[in-house]
Amino acid sequence: MTGNHKLLFATSNIGKFEEAVNVLEEYGLAIEMVRIKRFEVQSDDLVEIAKISALFALEEVKNPVIVEDAGLFIEALNLFPGPYSSYVYKTIGLDGILKLMENVKNRRAYFMSAIAYCWSESEVKIFEGRVDGTITHEKRGERGFGFDPIFCPREGDGRTFAEMSTEEKSMISHRGKSFRKLATWLK
Ligand code: IMP
């Protein structure tokens, strides 16, 4: 399957990469970041996006490769922004989400992570992770990336992801869960 090739992670998001390194090193697995020009597909389905992106990445790097696609799903907004999280983050951002959530009582939300591991054109394996939590009323914390300052995980102690260290976030995060599934399968 992986043979002697090292595992490549196609991403340009350093925050994601650091979280992946943090989890995989617990399993003695090394990973290398590879930036690929444009491979993001638009779809309503994170798994589909990750799958197609991984096949595209394999074509580029000619080595076993993983791609991860993640999104924030907010209950009161009919699961928006979901697969459009990246675009929403770049456009209306955290303040835009907080504005949409003004006076909204149901603040339940979750993050999903879908990893696609691809080692040949016909072989793609998917690993998923989810973390439930709530959208805060204000931004808190400086760490992490993306929507971390406004997401408070249910399993945590009231801090947002942006108030946690990478290790603390990875213990409970969607990405921590999906990467631990990948690591267990690889071992
Ligand atoms: P993508 O997987 O890079 O497409 O991520 C979609 C969007 O969700 C990006 O804008 C990220 O900022 C955001 N996102 C993904 N994972 C996380 C996370 O762990 N914390 C906060 N935001 C995230």
Image: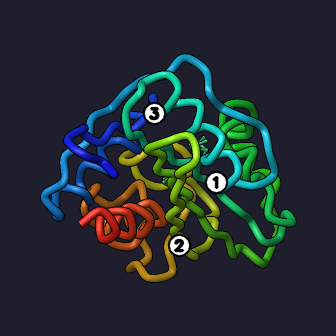
Residue sitting at 45 percent across and 64 percent down? 160
Mark 3 and mark 1: Cα distance apart in space? 15 Å
Residue beneath disc 3: 11
Mark 2 and mark 1: Cα distance apart in space? 11 Å
Give residue 79's quadrant in the image: bottom right
Say few, some or many: other residues with alpha carbon within 10 Å of mark 2 (under 14 / 14 to 19 / 20 or more): many
Counting residues from the N terminus, which is met first, the one under dot 2 or under dot 3?
3
* Residue 80 percent coordinates (x, y): 80, 57
Q: Nearer the viewer, residue 23 or 39?
A: 39
Give residue 185's quadrant in the image: bottom left
Counting residues from the N terminus, which is met first, the one under dot 2 or under dot 1?
1
Q: What label sits on residue 131 in the rendered view? A: 2
Figure check: 179 above or below 12 = below
Which of discs 3 and 1 lies nearer the camera? The answer is: 3
Name the element at disc 3: loop
Q: Nearer the viewer, residue 25 or 160?
A: 25
* Residue 171 percent coordinates (x, y): 32, 71
Figure check: 59 above or below 85 = above
Residue sitting at 38 percent across and 40 percent down? 64
